[in-house]
Image (spheres, rainbow, N blue to C red):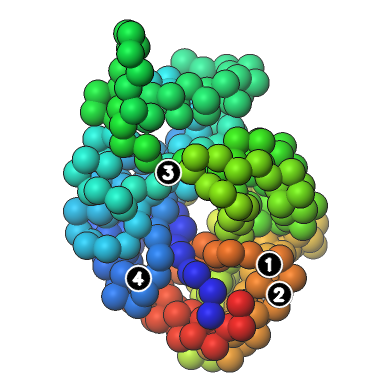
Amino acid sequence: MTTLSILDLVRISEDEGPRGALDNARDLAIHGENLGYNRIWVAEHHNMASIASAATSIVIAHIAAGTQRIRVGAGGIMLPNHSPLVIAEQFGTLAHLFPDRIDLGLGRAPGTDQGTLRALRRTPADSEHFPQDVRELQGYLAPGRPGQRIQAIPGVGTNVPLWILGSSTFGAALAAEFGLPYAFASHFAPDQLLPALQVYRSRFKPSKQLDKPYAMVGVNIIAADSDEEARRLATTQQMSFVDLLRGVSGPSSAPIDDIEDYWSPMEKAQVKRMLACSIVGSEATVRKGMDALVQETGADELIMVSDIFDHPARLRSIELIAAANDFISG
């Protein structure tokens, strides 16, 4: 058995608008909490018609208010989009509202396109200051220092746990240098998963927050009562990645019977590469896939995306995944 968590995309579907997506995320968290999941994260995305988590800290508050024990956090906040002071204020507020339950994962990508980046009043160059911004944010969340003129109220002294997110060795090296836990985005960018984990573990320096490396691996898992039904449910996520390649923005689509009718051979190859870290099938199939992934990566924790159009089917998926995890050797 390995520690298991949820990354929810807060999908806006063809059938339900943003309010439905937000309430479904909260319901998923309640269900996950009852099944023993460790944490649920949501991510900052802007100008995406299928994702309702742009105001990430508010979504976290909505989810945390409906749950009691499960950790709730950002996976992640794209720090170059923000002032570290403002993020410290937001997550410090969350930490006071929901003590010992809030996580703050940090990424350096914009989480959007270049035009939207300009609308956010940011530039691509802002990402170059990511390491310094992480240190500044840490300072605001730490206990106040004598003579400190600028404090994040009420963030000061909350020590909200920080994570570094990444899909390359850059984030791995930074997490190692800062002594922070590391989450790899292999659910959409798996190419450098193993090299990044090696860099992280080999270069890790203990810190006040963490005394040894802790790596969480992202994975797409779609479970159903049969392999065939799971493959059908997975076409929703496959279509969303095809649409991303085409520059098409729209709500999440219902699954289809034959994905081959939707994508071209070139699109198929690209999507298969992006979704290479995926496990799709029955409980037995999922168990084998999860066991193999844990053995390959040595992951301390898996954070899974179960991107399914129909909410009851998504709830059933996380039930089957939790049952499969009971038998994992990690």
Q: Badge 1, how many Cα within 10 Å: few under 14, some, many 20+?
A: some
Q: Which residue is mark 3?
A: 161
Number of the front mark, 4 or 2: 2
Distance from Cα at disc 2 to Cα at disc 3 = 27 Å
The residue type indicated by label 3 comes to: Pro
The outermost residue toward the front is 146
Q: Earlier in the sequence, mark 1 or mark 3?
A: 3
Location of residue 107 with respect to 24 vertically, above or below: above
The residue type indicated by label 1 comes to: Gly
Residue 263 sits in which quadrant? bottom right
Q: Is residue 156 visible?
A: yes
Residue depicted at x 63% and y 17%: 125
Q: Position of residue 305 (x, y in %)?
A: 51, 63
Location of residue 84 with respect to 189 vertically, above or below: above
Which is more toward the observer, 14 or 182?
Answer: 182
Q: Earlier in the sequence, mark 3 or mark 4?
A: 4
Q: Disc number at residue 106?
A: none
Q: Which residue is mark 1?
A: 298
Residue depicted at x 65% and y 41%: 205
Q: Disc number at residue 295?
A: 2
Q: Are marks 4 and 2 in contact (CB under 8 Å)?
A: no
Q: Earlier in the sequence, mark 2 or mark 3?
A: 3
Q: Earlier in the sequence, mark 4 or mark 1?
A: 4
Q: Which residue is mark 4?
A: 32
Secondary structure beneath disc 3? Answer: loop
Q: Position of residue 139 (x, y in %)?
A: 43, 24
Distance from Cα at disc 1 to Cα at disc 3 = 22 Å
Q: Badge 4, how many Cα within 10 Å: few under 14, some, many 20+?
A: many
Secondary structure beneath disc 1? Answer: loop
Q: Earlier in the sequence, mark 4 or mark 2?
A: 4
Q: Are marks 2 and 1 in contact (CB under 8 Å)?
A: yes
The residue type indicated by label 2 comes to: Gln
